[in-house]
Amino acid sequence: MKEIFKDIPKIKYEGSKSTNPLAFRYYNPDEIIGGKPMREQLKFALSYWHTMCGDGTDMFGAGTADKCFGLTDSMEIYKAKAHAAFELMEKLDIDYFCFHDRDIAPEADNLSQTNARLDEITNLLEELMKNSGKKLLWGTANCFTNPRYMHGAATSCNADVFAFAAAQIKKAVEITVRLGGDGYVFWGGREGYETLLNTNMGLELDNMARLMRMTVEYARSIGFKGDFYIEPKPKEPTKHQYDFDTATVLGFLRKYGLDKDFKMNIEANHATLAGHTFQHELRVARENGVFGSIDANQGDMLLGWDTDQFPTNMYDAVLCMYEVIKAGGFTNGGLNFDSKARRSSFEDEDIFHSYIAGMDTFALGLRLAHKLIEDGRMDQFVEDRYSSYKSGIGADIVSGKATMADLEKYALEMGDVTTLKSGRQEYLENILNSIMFG
Ligand code: XUL
Ligand code: CO
């Protein structure tokens, strides 16, 4: 296959002073930060759907970017997408990719033909992976685009749809395992409801858990050792999604006994749609032992939908990488760009500028998060803030020794609380700014 992005060279690290637009200023893949190469700490992944398939189509207009590479036959187009994806990964030094089944091969008239197409492209991906050393971060099934999923997939009111979704996921899991994927994602695109007037919420939730359990059992039976992820999102496309946010998903996983197999795939813009910060979602996952993988993008705070922009917000990147480091780094997960170039950024070159922006943002985020931790003032402040639980009555509360009666006696003797201290938020914000901007 001939080179597709002919005018773009391999993107190299040139340091922060470089003015070359097609160079990294902060991402130096093999540089050691905090004892590990940047590439291992960031585990960047290309997301196939936006990058290879997103053509800029929106509700008000047709696509603006050509992702057909001058071809007309649909399987030939999808083979060219595979070649283009690997050329992009090579030129951008991205080690991983991730996909939905329908991103890599188009649906045919029936399931067996669709599966045959998937097999054909999987053969090609396997060969491209072998030749390049690129790896699959995770696979997933698109159970939301086709009209059959109008009422949901696992949560559809129609059992035939549940069965079809199960068959589709079975195949997606098989492909993921065959390509050595480290993860399998559930993003419940239409697993939610528009109105309770027509909805049996109890059955829908039970069925969602049933399909997840079947998937875990089947995947483990064919040798899948990686993690399953749920990707929380509060709304869009359905008004109310069952996987609203990390805390909601945790309740679901624990109720159905799925919490040992599942972790979270946290997406930045999904967090903000749920009324949280990106860091909040990461922290909830970390504190509950379900931090898994990250879809890195950013939203537009003036818009109320999922804009999936390539991330450039440094505060979010630093605080995200702070959480990743505190979680002990990625294991099976990584950081994929579930992001798309803007509709008006329609030229091939824009794909490169977009990835350079996202990768440099997180590379700088990693560097600065390390500085923040090495500086230690913020962590020390938090440590000191809770020091009253280290001794005396606080230690008795934490150890479980203190009873209600003990606490009442203590409070009566104390008369009132006289030991409160400032939260010093502005002081801490000054520290963060001074670390980030020197
Ligand atoms: C949708 C979204 C998905 C998932 C994978 O908002 O984020 O692309 O990442 O299904
Ligand atoms: Co996502």
Image: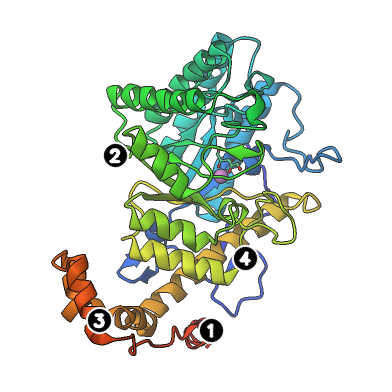
Q: Secondary structure at mark 1?
A: helix
User: Which residue position is annotated with label 2?
Assistant: 260
Foreground pick, 198 / 144: 198
Q: Position of residue 182 (x, y in %)?
A: 37, 40
Q: Earlier in the sequence, mark 2 or mark 3?
A: 2
Amino acid under disc 3: Leu
Give neighbour class at mark 3: few <14, some 14-19, many 20+ (Cα, 10 Å). Answer: few
Q: Is residue 97 left or right of residue 114?
A: left
Task: Give ligand 1's quarter of the image.
Answer: top right
Q: Which mark is residue 433?
A: 1
Relative to 308, is 113 above or below? above
Q: Nearer the viewer, mark 1 or mark 3?
A: 3
Give neighbour class at mark 1: few <14, some 14-19, many 20+ (Cα, 10 Å). Answer: few
Q: Position of residue 98 (x, y in %)?
A: 50, 40
Amino acid under disc 1: Asn
- Residue drawn at x 39%, y 74% is 370
Q: Which mark is residue 312?
A: 4
- Residue drawn at x 49%, y 32% is 140
- Residue drawn at x 72%, y 37% is 67
Give neighbour class at mark 2: few <14, some 14-19, many 20+ (Cα, 10 Å). Answer: few
Alpha carbons under labels 2 and 3: distance apart: 45 Å
Q: Is residue 433 left or right of residue 56?
A: left
